[in-house]
């Protein structure tokens, strides 16, 4: 696939970015991504220092050993652990309780955030859970000229270009900056407030919005659970029509009203920007399980068939996030019927 080739050519990479979360980033945004996440990458280290007796000097030494062992070839985590020997320390039962079984992830995370090593899928596919780490010279592909303050402003600009309309608090969540820094970064964008809301929009886009007329006929789209339509604002409620209030979504605690969630558990079916159903891929039967909030139309069935063919022929599976698997989604699948499409 074209995306896999771009990853292999290092023109598209998975990098720690906003909130230190991993995002798929194009070449011209590598520097912005790393700058955007730098201040959030220390949370695990703070926990390890406070509760597990890990010191900065210990991680410094481990980072140096890792860089040495990656000098000639990329290695998987188990191979790195073997190569650095006793420089990696077990954090015992207390560490396991806090999600940190050894010091290795702390060092790998720091080196990634600093742009000194790169994590890439072992089989070249982005939807894998196995990775190899290699040395990386970020300055060879970034200008090195963007300050962290400039990165804050640039991320705000890009965010509102991507989503169009959002509130200050929604940008604060996405960026992880907090309200004070988010407000400062948005101040120079010249955004205006949408009437009787907390939503902000660029003046030129406000005119487009006022003149927009929604299509009279349905236009169905099957998207991923983390599609930016919802993910950038963590706002499901505004995409639910009033007549669909009370529709439920699967969760770990059982069915929940879709108007009361911030994130989607299933992949989504949208019609002209409104959430109208859910779908997931059942690997065992190689078919999409789905439900529509309304009586499904022929047009919707055709879109489901199209997505099913794409997943089978191009992807093999359709995860909602990186750690999703056919086994872990059994409960979700049980909430969706296997509807003839």
Image: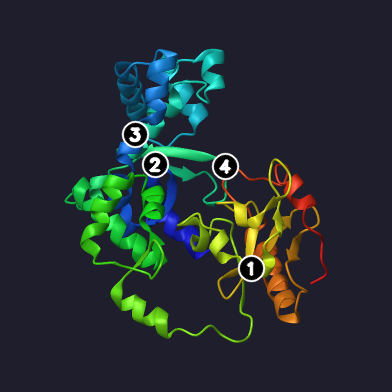
Q: Which residue is mark 2?
A: 20
* Outermost residue toward the front in this view: 196
For disc 2, the neighbor class at 10 Å (few under 14, some 14 to 19, many from 20) is many
Q: In front: mark 2 or mark 4?
A: 2
Above or below, 184 against 41 in this view is below
Distance, label 4 to label 1, CA atoms, is: 39 Å
* Number of marks: 4
Q: Which residue is mark 1?
A: 242
On the image, which quarter does residue 336 sit in? bottom right
What's the mark number on residue 30?
none
On the image, which quarter does residue 226 sit in? bottom right
Q: In front: mark 3 or mark 2?
A: 2
For disc 3, the neighbor class at 10 Å (few under 14, some 14 to 19, many from 20) is some
What's the mark number on residue 111?
3
Q: Secondary structure at mark 2?
A: helix
* Outermost residue toward the left in this view: 145
Q: In front: mark 1 or mark 2?
A: 1
- At 53% from the left and 15% from the top, the residue drawn is 94
Distance, label 2 to label 4, CA atoms, is: 18 Å
For disc 1, the neighbor class at 10 Å (few under 14, some 14 to 19, many from 20) is few
Q: In front: mark 3 or mark 1?
A: 1
Distance, label 3 to label 1, CA atoms, is: 48 Å
Residue 129 in percent (x, y) is at 57, 42
Residue 90 relative to residue 62: left or right: right
Q: In front: mark 4 or mark 1?
A: 1
């Amino acid at each position: 696939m074209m995306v896999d080739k771009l990853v292999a050519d290092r023109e598209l990479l998975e990098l720690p970015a906003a909130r230190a979360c991993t995002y798929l980033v194009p070449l011209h945004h590598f520097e912005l991504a790393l700058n955007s996440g730098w201040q959030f990458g220390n949370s695990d280290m703070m926990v390890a220092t406070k509760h597990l007796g890990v010191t900065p000097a210990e991680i410094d030494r481990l980072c140096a050993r890792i860089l040495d062992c990656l000098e000639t070839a990329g290695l998987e985590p188990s191979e790195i652990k073997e190569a650095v020997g006793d420089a990696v320390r077990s954090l015992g039962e207390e560490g396991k309780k806090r999600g940190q079984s050894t010091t290795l992830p702390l060092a790998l995370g720091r080196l990634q955030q600093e742009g000194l090593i790169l994590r890439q899928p072992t089989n070249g596919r982005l939807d894998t859970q196995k990775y190899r780490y290699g040395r990386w010279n970020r300055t060879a592909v970034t200008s090195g000229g963007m300050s962290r303050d400039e990165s804050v402003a640039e991320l705000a600009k890009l965010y509102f270009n991507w989503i169009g309309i959002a509130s200050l608090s929604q940008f604060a969540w996405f960026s992880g900056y907090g309200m004070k820094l988010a407000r400062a970064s948005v101040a120079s964008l010249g955004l205006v407030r949408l009437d009787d809301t907390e939503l902000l929009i660029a003046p030129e886009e406000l005119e487009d919005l006022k003149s927009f007329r929604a299509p009279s006929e349905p236009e169905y789209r099957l998207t991923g659970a983390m599609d930016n339509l919802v993910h950038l604002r963590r706002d499901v409620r505004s995409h639910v029509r009033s007549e669909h209030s009370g529709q439920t979504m699967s969760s770990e605690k059982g069915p929940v009203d879709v108007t009361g969630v911030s994130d989607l558990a299933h992949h989504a079916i949208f019609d002209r920007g409104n959430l109208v159903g859910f779908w997931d891929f059942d690997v065992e039967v190689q078919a999409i399980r789905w439900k529509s909030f309304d009586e499904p139309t022929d047009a919707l069935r055709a879109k489901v068939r199209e997505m099913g063919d794409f997943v089978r022929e191009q992807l093999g599976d359709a995860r909602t996030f990186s750690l999703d698997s056919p086994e872990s989604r059994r409960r979700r699948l049980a909430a969706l019927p296997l509807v003839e499409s």
